Amino acid sequence: MRPTVHDIAAAAGVSLATVDRVLNQRPGVRHVTRERVETAIRELGYVRDVAAANLAKGRTYPLVFILPASDNSFMHGLNAEIRQAVLRSPAERTDIRTIEVPAFDPAALVSVLEGLAREKPCGIALVATDAPDVRAAVDRLVRERFPIVTLVSDLTGSLRHHYAGVDNIAAGRTAARLLGRFLGPRKGEIAVLAGSMLVRDHRERLEGFTAVMAEEFPDLAILPVLEGRDDPEIAHMLVADALARNAGIIGVYSLGAGNRGLIRALKEKAVDRVLTVIAHELTAHTRAALIDNTIDAILNQDAGHEVRSAIRVLKAKADGLAVIEAQERIRLDIFLKDNLP
Amino acid sequence: MRPTVHDIAAAAGVSLATVDRVLNQRPGVRHVTRERVETAIRELGYVRDVAAANLAKGRTYPLVFILPASDNSFMHGLNAEIRQAVLRSPAERTDIRTIEVPAFDPAALVSVLEGLAREKPCGIALVATDAPDVRAAVDRLVRERFPIVTLVSDLTGSLRHHYAGVDNIAAGRTAARLLGRFLGPRKGEIAVLAGSMLVRDHRERLEGFTAVMAEEFPDLAILPVLEGRDDPEIAHMLVADALARNAGIIGVYSLGAGNRGLIRALKEKAVDRVLTVIAHELTAHTRAALIDNTIDAILNQDAGHEVRSAIRVLKAKADGLAVIEAQERIRLDIFLKDNLP
DNA sequence: CCAATTTTGATGTACGTAAATCAAAAAATC
DNA sequence: GATTTTTTGATTTACGTACATCAAAATTGG
């Protein structure tokens, strides 16, 4: 059986109360005694029974999720997964609150973060907007010992404890290689549809994409990026226009949201030509398009996994426990029509 | 706050002891009283606090993993993941034992399964060998209320509670489409290297592969399957021989283990020709081959995820709890050189 | 060496559930 | 209606930890 506090007390030759004082870093223990207890803990390999501790403390984990108020399928999906997590709250002892902030608005995000310090959640997950002020606010909270994870979009260079999202540079590189290999020896032009170059994950995807294209597929020329603002209408307009004006387009990489518009444009304007299309995010629309061959491959991040991972990591950090690294790696899912879930 | 047994007792107008009798299906409760308690449970939305219950019971979960004694990278990896899980046992209250049985030997597997009934584990995970006797043995154990999950290789048509592994037909189909698309307009022959057609997962991969090849890539002809018995030496010999004798081979699909031999053969015999190669299972060898362009894509199943999933599912079944379906779906990972973990 | 202070021990209660015991009440049997 | 049997209640202990209180011991300062 694993050792208990009683075993530690016996081994260290002190009382239960003293062990408790050491374990919960309460004052009133002489330095030498504290060391004696800590030695016993190490030697017996004691690990606190988190379940029993939580029971005794009546502990819950108040968590805050901060999301951009974006009206696209992916954010809706992310929201839905958080609601699922809320349903599991009783069993997981979590108490989850979500806050919506205007998208692409660092100031709003910062003010929410500042307000949070007072309400003392035991963990914060946020879809980061990449700005110096946000980084500073996050770093401040981390220094005040709040566990913080970034979700979907990272905040490189900040002190956040963990990033629950995919490697977007790798995603862009993967998209490029898939597109390049699928196109084979053909020469032509590639249209790229993004949401906004102000968002870090989109910038990174493009960066990875152009890098591999330049290195490995010199016969494919990347056209200037179309910024669809993750809006189906704008995306439709931009793509339809590009296809109408440029007959040399043989491939499309859609690295953001708004794929509904892209798909409509492809069906209207590309019936007579063979396009190879790679898009991000598996939704009802992209799934249907993959099945009817309008899209050739979908790169996806599993929002459910991201949310569950963020919660696990925040709880672990709050308890000062280790996480299973491999379990928390968010994979880049590649879907062809054959391996759809 | 979530309701406790006390609340149920008060609501149903019975004592704590009676609630306990109902909850733990102990005898000595009149039918009408039992119903009154169950109604209260439903109306208050009571859910047993598993952590507290386990604490009170001093419960552990004795689990058994039954694995084939195969000497290949994948099985070594699977074993390593189980050892990792053993290290987490104290925190997860598991008590994991692994049993090795000769590979491809239904009789041995059956006799292990029969022996298990006496030792009363609270859950069994097995890499199934697909045979009627095995199915019967599994069904018998399920009827005796043992939670059972198949791992890596399924036992279709049996009563097993869950399958922790990938959809191998989908894997084969995906491999075919990747290979077909990568090869583009080229015509030629495809070599297929398998472990053994006696193993269900290999049969299924081949089935999916040939189906998509026939439907969508009629210009590619599949050569007779090479059975390498998951052995690098045999694989090397078979592939080297095939390449030497057939100049028309332009693609290879390796759907089993023994890729070390395949890679060596490719490097020796295919320096002067352009081959497109898809293999299964990410190991040190396949990873290196992917990076140096010997292999074009690797399909993988995450052994760590499979083991953790099997454990979660077995524990949940033992407690009669629901599992998060999406979390337990084992994905088919597709790795190009750009998205390696 | 005494007093003041700090450190330690002993003990009890609590968390939500399991499991056991024994007495009391209710129902079924004759 | 008395007796047996079944059902229910009341109470206790336990799991491993947290946390509080009060007394006792050890240490420190003067």
Image (cartoon, coloured by chain):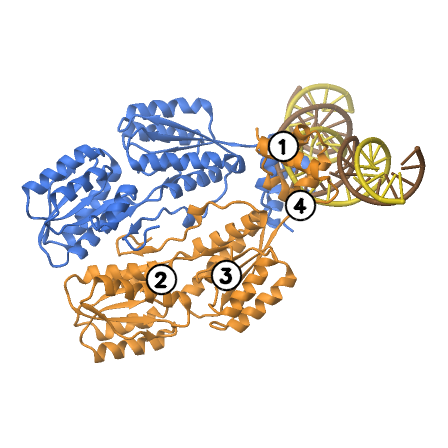
Chain colours: A orange, B blue, C brown, D yellow
Estimate the spatial distance between the alpha carbons at disc 2 and disc 1, rounded to whole Å.
51 Å
Residue type at mark 2: give it.
Glu
Residue of label 3:
A158
Q: Mark 2 or mark 4: name the one nearer the start of the chain.
A: 4
Please identify, in this view, whether the residue under mark 1 or under mark 4 is nearer the observer. 1
Estimate the spatial distance between the alpha carbons at disc 1 and disc 4, rounded to whole Å.
24 Å
Q: Are marks 2 and 1 in contact (CB under 8 Å)?
A: no
Residue of label 2:
A281
Label 1 Cα crowd, 10 Å radius (few <14 / some 14-19 / many 20+): many
Q: Are marks 3 and 2 in contact (CB under 8 Å)?
A: no
Horizontally, residue A300 falls left or right of residue C23, namely: left
Question: Where's residue A44, x and y in %?
Answer: 59, 31
Residue positioned 35% across, 55% down in the render: A332
Label 4 Cα crowd, 10 Å radius (few <14 / some 14-19 / many 20+): few
Residue type at mark 1: give it.
Ala
Residue positioned 26% across, 39% down in the render: B201
Say which mark, if any, is on residue A40: 1
Please identify, in this view, whether the residue under mark 3 or under mark 2 is nearer the observer. 3
Estimate the spatial distance between the alpha carbons at disc 3 and disc 2, rounded to whole Å.
26 Å
Horizontally, residue A95 falls left or right of residue A299, namely: right
Residue of label 4:
A57
Q: Mark 1 or mark 3: name the one nearer the start of the chain.
A: 1
Instruction: Please name whichever residue, B280 or D23, is drawn nearer the observer in this view of the structure.
Output: D23
